[in-house]
Each structure stands twice: as C-alpha cells, then as structure tokens.
Amino acid sequence: MIVKNIIVNIAKFLVLFVLLICSNMAYSNNIRILPIDNAKFIVGQKFDFLVEFRNNNLQRDSINVTINGVNAQEFFNKDAIIWVKDNITSYRINSVSFKQIGLINVEAKTSNYNSKITYKVVYQKAKKSAKNVILLIGDGMSLQAKQMARILSKGIKEGKYNDILEMEKLDKMALITTSGYDSLTTDSANSASAYATGHKSVVNAMGVYEDSTSDPFDDPKIENIVEILKRKSNKSIGLVTTANITDATPAAFVAHTRRRNEQNAIALAYLKQDIDVLLGGGLQHFIPKENKDSVRLDSMDLLKYYAKNGYSISFNKNELLNQSKNAKKLLGLYHNDNLNVYLDREILKNPEVLGKFNNQPSLLDMTMSALNVLSKNKEGFFLMVEGASIDKQLHKMDWQRATYDTIEFDKVVKMARDFANKNKDTLIIVVADHAHGASITGTYHELDGKSGREAVRTYANSLFPTFEDKNKDGFPDDPNPDITLAIQYANHPDYKADYRLKYTPISPTIYKDGKNIANPKANGEEYVGNIPQNEDQEVHAADDVVLMAEGIGSEYFKGVMDNTEVFFAMIRAFGIDAR
C-alpha cells in the first residue's frame, strides 16, 4: 500500500509538473514575444508586434526591445504603446512590417530577464505569375475520407479502382502538417488561418496571435492574403462554403479574432473588406434581432447595407443562377445556418430535414456562379471554396453523408480544372485543413444473419462493397447497399455503431446526468467512448493531410510541408510584393 501511494503521488507530481511547463511555454524567462519564434513573413506583410513581460514590479525604463540590435521603436519608426494590466506589462507597436528579406533577430530584456527569437522574411516569385488562384478546402477531408469517396464514386473491382477522383489527378502532391502553436490537434479556425496568413495561431483563433487579455478582438493581428491582395492589387475575392458563411474556414480569410464564434461581427467584417462574392449559409447573422430567425444582439439589418454597397442578394438556387449572369458582387444566404448536406438536399429530400430551405444551391452551383462573376475582372481573382460538411458529418460519425459531400466537392475540383484548362494562368490547390480518425476497417453485411461487430468483415472476409452507379453521375445509386463499408473511429464518445445509412440524421449522443451518453434512440451496438465524456461527438485527429495542386506555381508543393506554406505558395504564384 505504501509503495502504491508513493507511485500515485509521483504520478500526481508529474502531471502538475507537465501542466506547469505547458502554462509557461508561451513565456521564455517571463517574456512572451509575438509573433512567435521562427515565424515567417513575406516582405511587407503587416502585423502587430507585442512583447508581454510577466513581472509584478517591472519598471518601464528597464524595458529594452531590439530588432537586429536596433531599438524596436527606431527600427519600425513608430512609438510603442506600453501599459500594465493583471501583472502583465505590454509593449506593443501596431501595423508594422519588414522591408527587407533575411533573418530578423528580436531580443526583449529587462534588468532581470531576457528572451531572444528569430524571424524569417522572404520574397519569392514564380517564373510566371498566376492571374487566378483557386483554393479548394475539403474541411476534415483526411486521406481515408478521400478513399471512401473514391470507392463510392468510382468503384473497385478485383482490387483495382475503376478510376480515381478528380482531385487525385492533379499533378503535384505534398503532405501537410496541421498543428497550431498551442496544441498538437487543431481546429478549423486555426488551420484555415495558417492558410490565410502564413502564420500559426491557437485553437478557435484566426488572423491573430493570442495575448493575455480577455478581449477577443485586441490580439496582435497578422495580415492575411485577402488584405494583401486588396492593398496591392485589383483582384476580386470570392468565398464559397456549404457552411455558415461566417464559419471558421471562410472567416479566417478576413477576420482577426481569438474567438471564432464572434460570427455577428464577422458578417460585418466581410462588408468592410468589400469581399466580391460571398455564398453559403448563415442568414441568421445578417438579419436584425427582431426577426425570429436572427441570432444577432442588435437591430442591424446587414442585408440593407450589403444592398447599398452593390451586392445582388439571393436566398435560393434560382435567384443565384439568375443573378450570377450579370451581377458585379454577390451575397447568397441559403439557410439560417449550415446548408443541408448533399445526400439530404439532392437525394433523400426529406421535407422534415430541409424545412423551408427546399431550394438550396449545390456547391457546384455556387462555385460556377462565383467563377462567372470573378472571372469578369481582367486583373484576376482569389477564390476559396470549402466543402464544409465533410468535417461536420464525420463529427457526427455519419460517414455516408460525409462521403457524398466529398464526392460533390470533387466535382467542384473538376469544374475548377475545366476553368484552368481554358485559363492557363490559374493555380489550383486542393487540401484539407485537418484530419479525422475515421478508418476503413473492411466491409459490413448481414447476408448471413450476423449483425453488429460480428458483421464487420476483415481480411479475406471483406468482400468488395456493392455500390453501383448505373446512371454515371458519380454518386452511388443506393447509399445503403447489401455490402457497405465498415467505417470505424479512433476518437469517439459513447455511441451506438450502426454501419447502415441513417435516413434521418440523428445525434450520436445526448447529454444526461452531467455527461454525454450514447443516444438511446440510435440503432446499433453501444460502444464505450475513448475520449473525455464532455465531448459530444467524434473529434479531430492530428494526422497529416494530403495537398494536391496544378497550374502556375504548383511546383512549390513537394514532400512534407507545414500548413503555413500554403499561404507562401499562393503569394509566390501571384508574384505579389507586399511592400
């Protein structure tokens, strides 16, 4: 018993020690410098420079911050703002940039402490500049999610696929790492922010480095690709998603906030940034609080402001297709929140699921409309297209709905490739922002009377699935054939595993007695979760994701690359000098 107690106490001490280390990781010798060590900038990229000193008795005249040995205020030719709050002394110089390429050595010190970090400033230009860049993000589209789509869309016979996905035909490929600077496993805000800015951030944040204050809007900003293009070019900008248009991925290309849920503010930020095309869901963030469907806390009717600023506004598929022929700017809001997924919207068409939003455009409709408008600009454009519900359905452990949305996303890749074939000065990038722990174990069938885990067929028993596509539209005729895929999850809450299609979507968990439990209304065998019980759905994985690219500047992608490099590849392809 004594030995056991000693072991337990040692374990507790180690846990506390690790937590203490983690809480101090952002500070080196009681000093935190933002942006962080090894941050990489394109020359001329604007950012806010912040040094925080954790010291109760710090005298201001003891602070010394230098850039390449020169006083920071002199280096940037700007005065620093210095203030003290909650025992943190902040030294901040806003909206600065580096004018020359090379290594930048930063040192911050007081009479008692000092900290040194290094930045890298680059300028690269492709041999030929791209007029257009199309970035297609399959949210949560891990390698396995792509393979599920390939099996259902293209088919497999005697171990060989009948074809591969359109995205898999792009001629350049790389593996992309996904972690933020605060954690191994990221979320969509942090990961999309890396693509948008070339800088790491923290979970739930976009376009900022996290400071010590509680205000979600005062964190040090880093300029994103949209802001750089707006400042240094006349290119048009488009953001298209099957999610709420103010959701994390599209928002990361405009917003600067530590809290991704500030969606009402993000809806206004799009207008201030004058984004040319905005298509997706999220009507609830644009209408005043007096409307019963609104989630705004004020009486602002953003639709009126958008209309005054020249936007053609559509609320259904027919309006979008008509407006996109002649409109100069588009705002499309086709659901209060996220759009319904392809399977429910285009195949099952259950009125109880769709509700009043029974004429939503597809991701194909929205992308085609965006290209129609953006391509009118002779200076070119940047377009981000997100297949958002690949992620959202994997969270719900509904792999069939996730897979149909992956197939829809792949058809958008085909549309982008067709555009690029006609417009040779275009770069196409297809990538996920993070992964999910869903894996193909084998196949599943109940033809011999077995069910549940005993009907999961592995190795030699994993007969090929019987999905068919007789009408050749790229989608299986029946999403629920006799022999289907056995999809299992590495990171799940308590839930019931049912390998068959749920014709009506259902949450895998319910909250009861202070914890999340398997939804008793769900079918299948119940499995005990392997993640904390406060999690109500399957969670992201830290796995690398696949990037595929083609066109001007695509040679940049090769091997294993950090997610921030996607930003540098796009800037390089455009040939933008941000000075």
Image (spheres, grey):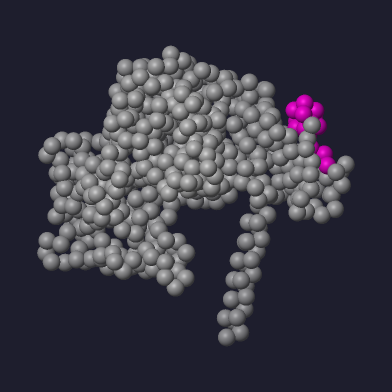
Residue stretch rendered in magenta on the structure? 63-78
383 vs 30: above or below: above
Quarter of the image that includes the N terminus? bottom right
- x, y (%) of residue 55? 80, 52
Please tell me how many numbered marks the rendered image carries: 0
Q: What quarter of the picture does the C terminus occupy?
A: top right
**In the image, is 74 to the left or to the right of 419?**
right
Name the residue at the top extreme: 378
* x, y percent for residue 422: 32, 17
Q: What residue appears at the point 73 percent right and 34 percent down from the top-left corner?
A: 93
Left or right placement of residue 244 versus residue 206 in this view: left
Q: Residue furthest front?
A: 290
Q: Residue at x 50, y 31 (%)?
A: 305
Eyeballing the image, is 68 above or below 299?
Answer: above
At a point 25% along the width and 55% down the height, the residue shown is 504
In this rendering, the answer to whether 452 lies above or below 574 is below
Q: Is residue 45 left or right of residue 134?
A: right
Report which quarter residue 404 is drawn in.
Answer: top left
Horizontal and vertical percent for residue 276?
A: 46, 26
- The answer to whether any part of residue 47 appears in the image is yes
Q: Can you tell which quarter of the image residue 239 is in?
A: top left
Can the viewer see residue 404?
no
| Identity of the residue drawn at 68% across and 49% down | 213
224 left or right of 548?
Answer: right
